[in-house]
Image (cartoon, rainbow, N blue to C red):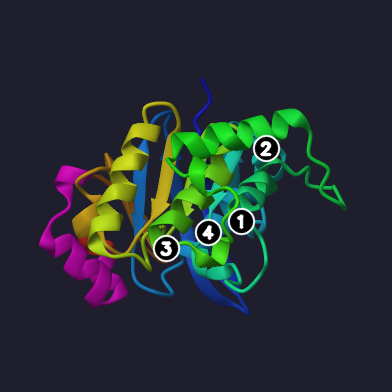
Amino acid sequence: MDKVISIEGVSFAYDHRPVLSDINLTVEPKDYMAVVGPNGGGKTTLLRLILGSLKAERGKVRVFGLPPAKARHMVGYVPQHGVFDPDFPVSALEVVLMGRLERRAFFPRYKREDYAAAQEAMGLLGVDNLGEYRYGDLSGGQKQRVLIARALVAKPKLLILDEPTASVDSRVEQDVYELLSRLNEEITILIVSHDLGFVSAYVNKVACLNQWLAVHKTEEITSEVLAGLYRSSVEMIQHRCAL
């Protein structure tokens, strides 16, 4: 079976300012990997390369053996819920149905099977009773479940989440991570998180990213590695993470 994600020698810069340097990353089927690192360390850029909204200046990115743009139908993406306008008059069901839209569709035209898939995904996430509620009126935890249902409604093989618990309390955070662990029994998960203390109890690998990248098994993450990643110079990060 192809690797889920294969990144080889990838570099990227904005206005000649390096953001990613010689990145190598492999994500295997059924991995549950967290990407951690400081703000500005390149996490969002890495996600955009994997999703195909950016192209690497150097190196190669493959998702299920394909260029990212051609593999997009196999990938579910959960953004931070803050990107949705809370005042926009859209129901929870309509948000989930967005995951069934064809990319080139100008007007949404949903079929019976789309509604069935949406109800199935919402049932899996425990929010099937919230379909008619306005999305902006939901709690933080409910919004996250709706967004995950939206990502799952097209039955992806890879689920990518960007800071899915950034705006929820610790109880909801634990609930979300336990939910993702159950989903990981079927699909591969890549999650960006700042809260390694929480996520490390669930993931099997951690990718430390601050322009350079190193992947560790969860049990290999030490306070020294984290101190180097978040507070030391690039040279120290390079040494600590064995880049």
Q: CA distance from mark 1 to mark 4?
A: 26 Å
Residue 202 visible (yes or no)? yes
Q: Name which residue type carries label 2.
A: His
User: Dot 1: within a 10 Å radius of its alpha carbon, few (fewer than 14), some, or many (20 or more) residues?
Assistant: some
Q: CB of mark 3 within 8 Å of CB of mark 2?
A: no
Q: CA distance from mark 3 to mark 2?
A: 29 Å
**Circle 2 sits on which residue?**
73
**Circle 3 sits on which residue?**
139
Disc 3 secondary structure class:
loop
User: Dot 4: within a 10 Å radius of its alpha carbon, few (fewer than 14), some, or many (20 or more) residues?
Assistant: some
Q: What residue occupies the far top of the structure in this picture?
A: 1
Which one is closest to the eye, mark 1 or mark 3?
3
Which is more N-terminal, label 3 or label 4?
4
**Relative height, residue 135 to residue 100 (above, below):** below
**Circle 4 sits on which residue?**
79
Name which residue lies at 43% across and 55% down. 142
x and y percentages locating residue 66 in the rendered image: 65, 35
Q: CA distance from mark 2 to mark 1?
A: 24 Å
Main secondary structure type of the part rendered in magenta: helix
x and y percentages locating residue 93 in the rendered image: 62, 48
Name which residue lies at 59% across and 61% down. 134
Which is more N-terminal, label 2 or label 4?
2
**Residue 58, label in figure:** 1
Image quadrant assignment for residue 112: top right
Q: CB of mark 4 within 8 Å of CB of mark 2?
A: no
User: Dot 2: within a 10 Å radius of its alpha carbon, few (fewer than 14), some, or many (20 or more) residues?
Assistant: some
Q: CA distance from mark 1 to mark 3?
A: 42 Å
Disc 2 secondary structure class:
helix
Which is more N-terminal, label 4 or label 1?
1
